Image (cartoon, helix red, strand yellow):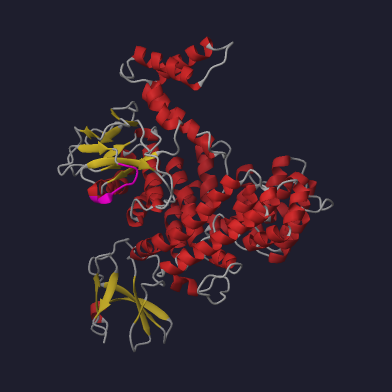
Amino acid sequence: MKTSSDHWCLAAGSSIIRMMHHFLGKTAFRRGLTNYLQFFKYDNAEQDDLWQHLTEAAHEASTLPRDLTVKTIMDTWTLQMGYPVIKVERSADGTSATVSQPVRRLHHNSLSRSARQERFLLVKDENADDTHDYKWWVPLTYTGQDQPDFSHTQAKVWMKDSEAQVTVTSLPPKDQWVIFNLQQTGYYRVNYDPNNWNLLIQQLLNDHTAIATVNRAQIIDDALDLARAGHLPYSTALNVTTYLPREADYVPWAAALDNFAYLSKMLKDTAAYGALRNYLLDILVPLYDSVGFQDRESDPLLDQYKRQKALSWACQLEHRDCLHNAAASYAAWMASPANSSISPNLKSTVYCHAIAEGGEKEWFFAWTQYMAANVGSEKVTLLRAMGCTRRPWLLSKYLEMALSTDSGIRKQDALTVFSAVARNDVGRPLAWTFLQDQWSKIYNFVERVPMWMIRSVSQNFNKEHLLEELFFTPPHPPLPSLPPHSPLLLFLLPHPQLFSTLTESVSAHLIEFHKTHAHQLPHNALDMAQLLEEVRGNVAWLRTRYQGVLAWLEAQGHAYLLPSQMLVKSRPVEIFHRRTSTGDIYKNCPDWWIFDRRTNTSEPKAASKYDGMSGERDEGGMCKLSGIS
């Protein structure tokens, strides 16, 4: 863990301590920690001293086998990178599973009734020179549908780092689900066989409260992250989220929306974004309606967090009622600057989207309020909100003001301005150009150029932004110069060889950028390597996962104007399948929507009654027309 230099180390450390707290038990953990602090209160100590006192307390409480020490377990978590993903595959009758630890790479063809362990990577580099055989001591906790008990978080079975396999028995029959990693106390991800995933999805749809709240969040988080990393089809992961309109708890929503943020970022400049937006609105609007726009301080804290999330996302997805309420609240504040009724919890959302939907008047009012504010947090909130405007000239002016000593922007806030502009889809290319053109000025003004400034403008490069960078280092063979948001990008998707060239070219440009300014980035070599890995991962995701996400959105009826749209030969009509009002997709696609270009109207018609055409579903679940002459 000491090789990591960012906040991830702190998050991982707290998660590992939480896991240890649960497998030792509350009493043993606290007794061991107390004894350790008492024994070394006037002396130096090292990690193994803590492990020794925790081991003694656990043996005394009988929460750890006598032949097992905390050091044996924890050295596998603290002295190597990452965390494992465990594959759970049940036997034919479902009542047992074999848990095994394979070699470093996962060989899918050899899986059989087993749970396998490997280091989890969002971006997997098959050519990486890391040959370490990652294995952990993993505390396995689990429960089944027959007798669900999510409270027992001490290990039922230990997966040793030296064992080839561990058999788990007494599981429910194959038509009932099992869940591993209760309350998500273990620092690992869990992947299941397709049947168990389907059972979990059906349970969530039928009665999601049968699964503990934290485990609902875990299932969502694991599924979407596993899909992002290529361990699970996106169709399965997204099916997990279809129950969310009935979800009322904050934690599962937080897990879902944090993962949807990546999907949204990746699809923002693709033809699939409209479909994703429609799906997200479908599942989010019930939550938005339930929490309301008015914040109430008397609400429980998690309900306030839930409202913040719901309103932030609803406005981000351009939900009209949310935008209207944000604009109205901001307008009321403009009418009476001394009497703002905007809740502190909602200021970021209201300020940002009112300024984005407004114009110069809204922006300059925020600037006036920034200059008048004497509370640091209010100043920062306003600075970030002013970066939300869609007026390019204002954004460019804002960046210049950040480096001016007489603009009124505090020197320590210059970086806040830059990151605010970089988060804006309109502002990101402006911020990147500004960073390159004004590098020396920025470096001298803030006395450093933090790596996160570079990351803020480039971490979501995937295709449009990558292609912009590509102009600095043309690929071979040369590609025609492409404008932003070029439709040719959709043509490039099926051609991995072109994306490979793009990736290498952009990576080469960023590497050259780092070399040029290496003397000003003495401690950022690891950070730059991580950024390059993210960029490659984003482009690889778009190349390998995009079609799966798009196909699922189409099958759900959200992408009816995208590639599944079919133009009838020799007839000026378009025929596309759409989900019915009940949400069902008929097995043989008898229900089609017909759009007639001659009248600009659309109506549902049975395909079998329309010029002799009929519809059927292919193996991938997509509807196709037949009988077209």
Residue furthest toward the left? 93
Q: Specify whether residue 106 is painted magenta.
A: yes
Is residue 49 shown left or right of residue 437?
Answer: left
What's the residue at 53%, 41% (across, down)? 305
If the image is split into quadrants, where does the C terminus sit?
A: bottom left
Q: Residue at x 29, y 41 (%)?
A: 102
The image quadrant of residue 423 is: bottom right
Q: Is 161 rendered above or below residue 500?
A: above
Q: Main secondary structure of the magenta part?
A: loop
Q: Is residue 523 left or right of residue 570?
A: right
Does residue 413 sit above or below 280 in this rendering? above
Answer with the quarter of the image where residue 117 lies: top left
Residue 617 x %, y %: 25, 69
Q: Farthest bottom residue?
A: 570
Q: Left or right? Give the position of 351 relative to 13.
A: right
Please name whichever residue, 134 or 172, is drawn nearer the observer in this view of the structure: 134
Q: Residue furthest right?
A: 406
Report x, y in % for residue 442.
Answer: 74, 52
Name the residue located 72 percent from the left edge and 56 percent from the top edge: 439
- Identify which residue, 25 or 489, lies in the foreground: 489
Q: Quadrant of residue 343?
A: top right
User: Residue at 76% of width from left, 58% of height from top?
Assistant: 400
Residue 370 can be seen, yes or no:
no
The residue stretch that appears in magenta:
103-109
Q: Nearer the viewer, residue 48 or 346?
A: 48
Relative image position of residue 578 (x, y in whole percent): 34, 69
Residue 568 visible in rendering? yes
Q: Does the magenta segment cover residue 114? A: no
